Amino acid sequence: MLQKLYDWVDERVDITPLWRDIADHEVPEHVNPAHHFSAFVYCFGGLTFFVTVIQILSGMFLTMYYVPDIENAWRSVYYLQTEVAHGQIVRGMHHWGASVVIVMLFLHTLRVFFQGAYKKPRELNWMVGVLLFFIMLGLGLTGYLLPWDNKAYFATQVTLEIAEKVPFIGEATKTLLAGDPNIVGAQTLTRFFAIHVFFLPAALFALMAVHFILIRKQGISGPL
Amino acid sequence: MSEKRQQVSRRQFLNYTLTGVGGFMAAGMLAPMVRFAIDPALQASSTGEFKAVEDVENITEEPTRVDWEIDQVDAWYESTVTKTAWVYKDENGDIVALSPICKHLGCMVTWAGNDDYPDQFYCPCHDGRYYKSGENVPNTPPPEGLDYYEYKIEDGTLLLGPTKPRGEA
Ligand code: HEM
Ligand code: FES
């Protein structure tokens, strides 16, 4: 049945080369943990991607209940966590995943660093990776405000004051982020929400695409 | 190796195990999220309580609009919303309480809402009409008659509860 469906489409649009190009290539021996167990360090990139997928999916589902409004944000999170079936699990995935993804990203970066995998010709991908790291920190930072509880509020207060300390552009940056020169409130929450669910994920997807295209093009770095 | 022992090739075995493990992980990830998303469809809807709306002696044979307020809990948002009924006594003196919600596409009907039909309920959205009994007038858009409110009478006061479609009345 599935095979027939596949053949039907393939016969007309020839999709086999498309997915073969993405999925069908040999894993070199030196990155295969079945050959050398220490090769598990090559898994961290994939694990980062895996957790990122969890973040995106759980985030999309959380947005079905969450409202970015100071009157209702906390109540909507409380409601989805206590009243909606599996709310605690879905929020838990997003909450813990946000930390796990940073850990994975860090381990992946360490592997690349200590293996010198960033060296020519892969310098560009290192830079893309650094940008990805910043995007991820940004997602964690903006997401942290969204539950609009005390921890979220004061963490954001602190963040904004740090931003304000930047020479010359600090105050403008703070106002742009908070939406108001003095208040951390309604406009801060809507801005952080927009950044968290639209702007940064868009940047994340674009950079991940570049990251993976470069890997495919250059191949994985050779054995040590 | 003989032909017989080749029934499952190494490639097939790996394909099956990878698909199985991958499917298991995807299912474990998606199951809570899907259950989370469909929760509203599975939550028992609150059966409305009965609320006092009018003294029975004030009710005449002329359909009259009564409004009352109920507390509504909409997830994290609580508010009072106004409910409306058209109430009258039929020829036997029994109470009839009709829902104002048009059975065509949900607009609000009004008794004598159109001067051309002073003894019918009228819906302005697509000219739907109902007789005094609530039955829909044939050849107007509504496919069935107006819903009834369930009612109780306590100490001479009319209490209205949830609505019921005609089919079940
Ligand atoms: C890799 C990407 C992401 C990271 C690291 C991340 C991080 C976070 C963090 C740290 C929180 C606070 C959670 C808590 O305190 O419980 C949060 C909340 C939230 N995130 Fe994300 N997020 C990511 C992607 C997304 C995406 C793609 C969406 C939506 C499309 C999203 C939607 C939300 C929503 C609605 C909340 C508020 C609900 C809550 O606090 O539990 N997130 N995020
Ligand atoms: S909604 Fe009443 S006639 Fe269409």
Image: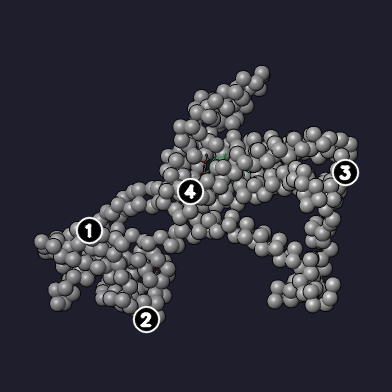
For label 2, being within 8 Å of ligand 2 is answered: no
Q: Amino acid at mark 1?
A: Lys
Q: Amino acid at mark 3?
A: Gly
Q: Nearer the viewer, residue B142 or A98?
A: A98
Residue ID for mark 4: A88
For label 4, being within 8 Å of ligand 1 is answered: no
Instruction: State the residue at coordinates (41%, 51%).
Output: A83
Category of crowding for the residue at label 3, using alpha-carbon neighbours closer than 10 angstroms: few (below 14), some (14–19), many (at least 20): few
Q: Position of residue A124 (x, y in %)?
A: 83, 38
Q: Nearer the viewer, mark 4 or mark 1?
A: 4
Instruction: State the residue at coordinates (82%, 68%).
Output: A14
Q: Amino acid at mark 4?
A: Gln
For this view, does B5 lie left or right of residue A193? right
**Which corner quadrant of the image does residue B28 belong to?**
bottom right
A166 in relation to A9, above or below: above
Residue ID for mark 3: A222
Quarter of the image with the N terminus of chain A in it: bottom right
Q: Nearer the viewer, residue A54 or B22?
A: B22
Category of crowding for the residue at label 1, using alpha-carbon neighbours closer than 10 angstroms: few (below 14), some (14–19), many (at least 20): some
Q: Nearer the viewer, mark 2 or mark 4?
A: 4
Dot 4 and dot 3 within a common chain:
yes
Q: Assign a secondary structure to mark 4.
A: helix
Residue ID for mark 1: B51
Q: Position of residue B23 (x, y in %)?
A: 64, 61
Q: How far apart in space, not on screen, are marks 4 and 3 (Cα)?
A: 44 Å
